[in-house]
Amino acid sequence: MQVDLIIQASWIIPVEPASVIHQNHSLVIDNGRIIDLLDSEQALQQYQPRNLEVLSNHALIPGLINCHTHAAMTLLSGLADDLPLMDWLQNHIWPAEQKWVTEAFVRDGTDLAIAEMLCGGTTCFNDMYFFPEITAQQAVLHGIRANIGLIVFDFPTVWAENADAYIEKGLALHDSLRHQSLISASFAPHAPLYSVGCAVA
């Protein structure tokens, strides 16, 4: 049977079942899906790959998932990062965002973040930031899976003027992403942490 790709590795370590290591095995991939995992010799007997990748000194693991990102904020890395959270946010990050965040900022920052994630083995990320349509667009462009947070605030920002507008734009974006195989979407209200903090204070 002809397939798109076989990846041979010295070790393949799945998430499930736990504590299992497959030595000298291969992943067989066709049409973007893993269709088999078997001994490397058997793989080449059963399948004819269009491409063969041999990782003779590597351990192959499933792609990592980053569950909490604001990908475009990669462009703000290192800004006042030695301060307490609220000082950092209120006096440095939020003013910087008000000054600099645009569609182009989000596009460039997301591109950089995706490059860093892919280099480190992350193949899926969960994001929440301004201009989520740009983040989704760049994730599709670069072939990485993402859950796109549809932001909701009760104050105006560069993306929307009030809670109703956030929800309306979020629903429209959700509908536009329905057929993207790499992308899912979820509402991402901001932020219970600060509401609770203010109430307690």
Image (spheres, helix red, strand yellow):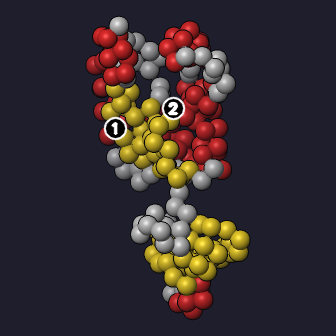
Q: Secondary structure at mark 2?
A: loop
Say few, some or many: other residues with alpha carbon within 10 Å of mark 2 (under 14 / 14 to 19 / 20 or more): some
The residue positioned farthest toward the bottom in the image shown: 45
The spot of residue 120 in percent (x, y) is: 63, 50
The residue at which mark 2 appears reads as: 70
Q: Nearer the viewer, residue 64 or 158?
A: 64
Identify whether 134 is placed above or below 80: below
Give the residue type that dot 1 points to.
Ser
- Is residue 6 toward the left or the right of residue 18 in the image? right
The spot of residue 47 in percent (x, y) is: 54, 86
Identify whether 145 is placed above or below 158: below
Q: Secondary structure at mark 1?
A: strand
Q: Residue at x 55, y 26 (%)?
A: 103
The spot of residue 124 in percent (x, y) is: 49, 49
- Quadrant where the C terminus lies? top left
Residue 41, by quadrant, is bottom right
Q: Is residue 129 visible?
A: yes
Spatial CA distance of label 2 from label 1 is 14 Å
Q: Residue at x 28, y 19 (%)?
A: 164
Q: Residue at x 54, y 76 (%)?
A: 22
The spot of residue 125 in percent (x, y) is: 49, 44
Give the residue type that dot 2 points to.
His
Mark with earlier residue (2, 1): 2
Q: Residue at x 46, y 63 (%)?
A: 15
Identify whether 201 is placed above or below 145: above
Q: Nearer the viewer, residue 180 or 197?
A: 197
Identify whether 137 is placed above or below 192: below
The residue at which mark 1 appears reads as: 186
